[in-house]
Image (cartoon, rainbow, N blue to C red):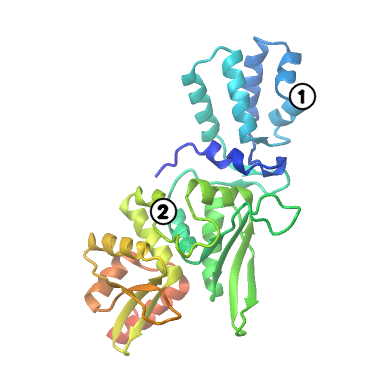
Amino acid sequence: MQLENYLLKLDEKSYIKKGSDSIRLYNLGPIIESIYKDLKKFKPIADIEKASKTHQTYSNWILNKTGISIQEFYSLCNYWKLTCHKTDKQLFVLWNKIYKNSYYFGCTNGKQIRLPKVLDSNLAYLLGVIMGDGHLANPDRSYDKLTTYNSEIRITSGDRSTFVNLSKIFEALFHYKPRIYSELSKVNRKFYRFVIKSKPIHRFLMNICGVPIGKKCYKIDVLPLIKNAPLKLQKKFIVGFIDADGCIRLAKQRYPMVSVSQLDPRILEYIINFSKLLGIKWNGPYKSHHPNNRNSMIYLSDKVNFKKYLKHFSPIDPTRKEQVKFVLSHMYGRAP
């Protein structure tokens, strides 16, 4: 599913407190040179540079030595429209040409990141994982006095194999390989996480994909971007979410069980309603009566539903795949 031109949303002015907060575009020298040539037909070079940038800056943009901020580029396009007597339609065509040719995004001192232009299976799955086990920092709540934009993205799990798998997805989507960190919990249990600090990726997930920022315990719902996606992509989102927040096990040493629990039941209701279209019946959501557990839970636990579940929501996470193998080996005496 193609994503609409998101350049201005990516570089929203409200998040720019200093120059390094701007999202920049790279390798667009030919388009900038074409705009510059058009401007010179109507204005002396001195006037152009006075109205916008110095000659050195134009040279750096054209020669791809430096990136140009999205807001700056949009201002240049509007200046081109007024100076060269272009129409709104011509501005629209130019801006979409810039979007089409924008592959790498970055900031003044950061890595250049490739951002997706399409919602595909990898992105839908990753969004499901982030809604389950991820955390997107509130950009306005900085962790030190020098940082004006908190771009931290965290994904946490107890299994290293989860991150080996997610690394491949990050590389496919963003041409970026996150580092895997390991830590010990308060009960001396080892867990793993990604800690990613990238403004382009953070802004993309927040502004384009609609991932909630900060504490998300009461914000867990299917993303609007996913709701409007084809069914196969909605499936991948659910797979990602259950891979992150679900459990697949053998109940009473006999019955297959898939369960998902959440404080906010909205996403559970979405999974129930979506699964009905596929002939899969979940039980719940049931509210926990335990004083220290306010979660709601859904589950399925019979062989017929489990077989349908695997057909439509087959896990991608290595740990979940092993859980499925274990359950099937006890159900049928062999792995699938």
| Number of numbered discs on residues | 2
Q: Is residue 220 left or right of residue 169?
A: left
- Where disc 1 sits, the SS reads loop
Name the residue: 24% across, 78% down: 303
Most extreme residue toward the bottom is: 253
Q: Position of residue 244 (x, y in %)?
A: 46, 69
Vertical placement of 199 versus 163: above or below? Answer: above
Name the residue: 72% across, 11% down: 44
Residue beneath disc 2: 223
Name the residue: 55% across, 12% down: 85
The label on residue 54 is 1
Vertical placement of 303 versus 12: above or below? Answer: below
In this view of the protein, which residue sits in the foreground, 327 or 200?
200
Closer to the chain start, of discs 1 and 2, is 1
Q: Position of residue 260 (x, y in %)?
A: 37, 72
Q: Counting other residues with Cα less than 10 Å from the Cα at mark 2, is it few (<14), some (14-19), or many (20 or more)?
A: some
Name the residue: 71% across, 40% down: 19
The quadrant where residue 102 appears: top right
Label 1 vs label 2: CA separation?
Answer: 43 Å
Q: Nearer the viewer, mark 1 or mark 2?
A: 2
Q: Counting other residues with Cα less than 10 Å from the Cα at mark 1, is it few (<14), some (14-19), or many (20 or more)?
A: few
Q: Position of residue 57 (x, y in %)?
A: 75, 28
- Where disc 2 sits, the SS reads loop
Q: Position of residue 118 (x, y in %)?
A: 45, 45
Q: Is residue 186 left or right of residue 128?
A: right
The quadrant where residue 309 appears: bottom left
The amino acid sitting under disc 2 is Leu
The amino acid sitting under disc 1 is Thr
